Amino acid sequence: MTDASPWWRSAAIYQIYPRSYADGNADGVGDIAGIRSRLAHLRDLGVDALWISPWYVSPMADAGYDVADYRDIDPLFGTLREAEELIAQAHSLGLRVIVDLVPNHCSDQHPWFQAALTAGPGSPERSRFHFRPGRGESGALPPNDWPSHFGGPAWQRVTEADGTPGEWYLHLFAPGQPDFNWDSPAVRAEFESILRFWFDRGVDGFRIDVADNLVKHPGLPDLAAIPEGAPSPVSDQDGVHEVYRAWRRIADSYDGERIFVGELWVADRQRFIRYLRADELHTGFNFPFLQAEWSAERMRAVIDDTLAGHTQIGAPATWVLSNHDTTRHVTRYGRADSGYGFDRRRLHGTPVDLPTGTRRARAAALLTMALPGCVYVYQGDELGLWEVEDIPEHLIQDPAFHGTDGADPGRDGCRVPIPWEGDAPPFGFNGPDTHGDGTEPWLPQPAVWKEYTVAAQTGDPDSMLELYRRALRLRRAEPGLGDGPMRWLPTDDDGVLAFTRPGGLTCVVNFSRRPVELPPHEAVLLSSNGFDEGRLPPDSTVWLRT
Ligand code: TEU
């Protein structure tokens, strides 16, 4: 990490899911006051930046990913003033702030969508969205065969002003999330203005929600009409790159390296890196890495593929283990099938070996922090939290659950409020003075999390939290970590990965079932799970000075 390299090529970035981080007004839902009261945790952890999931005005049809006003804060979370104060406070602690931008769709309560409903078919107001007549004699069938990610068709029929059933609008996600029409100049201008609004307030960057989905194939063709192997009509259309070129010009017009990170579910690496060309986005989430099973072969393949692609384009890689949409990795790595392929339905409730998942999560943390590029920490990763799979159904809020009548267990299991301190729920979630009383957190926390609170883990050398703190501190101090080259080292065992970084830092990961000899070294800098008679035990990582 040289001084000349911009911050975003090496950063450790912490994801805050605001409704579950900390609750400042004790109403059971996290908020900006809560984040501000717990910012010191992030400073002590040693991250460089925080990314805050959406905090804008929203009816919460999808936990804030349905935005009704992009320039104000939802009262559930606080006020615009508080957001500005949070940005300033974070900056004073040396933390950068990335906000979440949701450009693919808004809320059905957004004034533009409300105006589109009123204005009627053929109006300029409707041209900002994808309105179409239905199929069939009376237009009672959806305009095409696209499914929504949250179950059912991606189309909802509206009632026109005269009370008759009318056109349909496209929503790739919940019905409360109408998709914008990115062919509309008004939509493009609006988002450029929104970028400026937040850049003017000092934010250091944007995470772009479903960044590859904005532009749709013209004509919105049926999926059934797309030849096998042809590109999807809803994702990764070539036209989307022009949007990001325009955004990059705006970011570059501000001082201080303002950045974009794209949520890009683009599996083809060559297609993925096109988003990271020098005049487009700075970085994108490396989901193939998140999805990989816990095996040396698979991990090495995905690391090689990642680095080959990113080197080709000159962009830094990112390493992500979990986020607010995916099964927590302690749980994933504790399952016989440790990959992630959006198959929550298949894997939910299948056996989990938490001790093994936790060992592997520790090893994975050190692996990600030793790899070249940026590393992401999802709130609770640093506490070793796992997916909560027994949330009572009546408390589940995720539209992925409700839209599929529960066939998809949804994502609330990785969104359970953070345990901060104390012996009983809400574990200080709604303030240090209110444990044991006050309003219940919006999702219940497991009672055993009393051993996983920030307070309980602080000072315990064996805790996940202290491992993260030590690792992040070392990562910052070691000039060879973060951005820069890495070189694989040969190993005797094909269940072991070893690589070295500049400055003589070697990282060894043992995926095998046997303890393995360490390569020659001067010193042990950090180990995820200790040693077994001087050898590296299974499911462990060590950082060596060589
Ligand atoms: O997620 C987009 C996405 O493709 C998935 O991760 C999605 O959560 C999954 O398909 C649902 O089963 C982003 C946000 O991260 C997610 O929280 C939002 O729900 C979604 O976009 C819509 O804004």
Image (cartoon, helix red, strand yellow):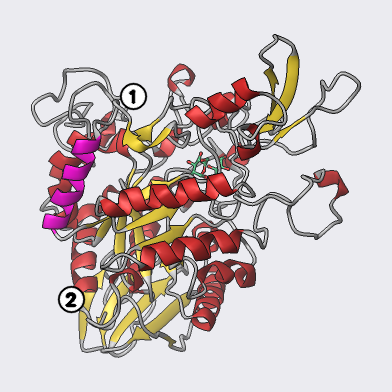
> Which corner quadrant of the image does residue 518 belong to?
bottom left
The residue nearer to you, when weighing 481 against 113, is: 113
> Which corner quadrant of the image does residue 151 belong to?
top right
> Which corner quadrant of the image does residue 370 belong to?
bottom left
Q: Residues within 10 Å of mark 1 (few under 14, many from 20)?
A: some
Looking at the picture, does residue 452 appear above or below residue 125? below
The residue nearer to you, when weighing 110 against 310, is: 110
| In the image, farthest residue toward the left | 433
Left or right: residue 121 compared with residue 187: right
Which residue does the image show at 43% across and 60% down from the upper left?
A: 261
Which residues are drawn in magenta?
Answer: 80-93
The residue nearer to you, when weighing 363 against 328, is: 328
Which residue does the image show at 15% across and 61% down from the upper left?
A: 94
Label 1: which residue?
A: 442
For ligand 1, tell me if the residue under mark 1 lies within 8 Å.
no
Q: Position of residue 495 (x, y in %)?
A: 50, 74
Label 2: which residue?
A: 477
